[in-house]
Amino acid sequence: MNKLYNISEISKLLNLINPKTKKPLNYILRYWEKEFKEIKPKKINNRRYYSSQQLETIKKIKFLLKDKGMTISGAKKIFKTNIKNLDYNDFNSLKDKYYKDFFKEKSKTILNKINKIKLYGKKNSS
């Protein structure tokens, strides 16, 4: 069975805490619930509980909004694309494998064009 986290636990895990009062900033999560359809907490006795899968989604949202400085509409666009896993180790990218494959393919194309140009020059110089 999946562990359920309450809203205060999530706020503490994500370090969404008021520095002066040390209280969790639960209103941020409640606002994100309204903005992102991916967050649907279970309500038990009028309290919000999140699954571990939703916790990962909330971590991604926090990463995009707080760490990357994106707007909410920008983060929504990221969720609409099929980028599922964010790369938390490299803050300059959103999906390491996707960009690595993209640049590898581009590099091969450029290398092939360079080789064709070199061969073309050799043929004409004789």
Image (cartoon, rainbow, N blue to C red):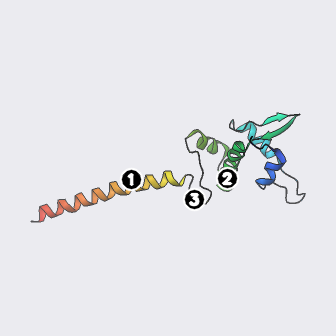
Q: Residue at x 60, y 59 (%)?
A: 91
Give the camera-side residue of 89 and 78.
89
Q: Nearer the viewer, residue 52 or 115?
A: 52
Side of 24 relative to 79 (left or right): right
Q: Identify the element where label 1 is drawn.
A: helix
User: Dots 3 and 1: beta carbons under 8 Å?
Assistant: no
27 left or right, relative to 68: right
Q: Nearer the viewer, residue 99 or 120?
A: 99
- Amino acid at dot 3: Asn
Q: Residue 104, position in %: x, y? A: 41, 56
Q: Sequence-wise, which precedes: disc 3 or disc 1?
A: 3
- In the rendered image, residue 66, in percent from the top left (x then y), is placed at 70, 53
On the picture, is 55 further left or further right than 84? right
Q: CA distance from mark 3 to mark 1?
A: 20 Å
Label 2: which residue?
A: 63
Tag shown at residue 105:
1
Q: Residues within 10 Å of mark 1 (few under 14, many from 20)?
A: few
* Secondary-structure class at tag 2: helix
Label 3 and label 2: CA atoms lie apart by 12 Å
Above or below, 89 relative to 48? below
Helix, strand or loop at label 3? It is: loop
Q: Earlier in the sequence, mark 2 or mark 1?
A: 2
Please say if the residues under marks 3 and 2 sit with CB atoms less than 8 Å apart.
no
Sequence-wise, which precedes: disc 3 or disc 2?
2
Residue positioned 23% across, 57% down in the render: 116
Q: Residue at x 62, y 57 (%)?
A: 88
Q: Between tags 3 and 1, which lies in front?
A: 1
* Whole-percent x, y for residue 22 in the image: 88, 57
Residue at the spot of label 3: 92
Residue type at numbered disc 2:
Phe
x and y, in percent, of residue 82 in the image: 55, 41
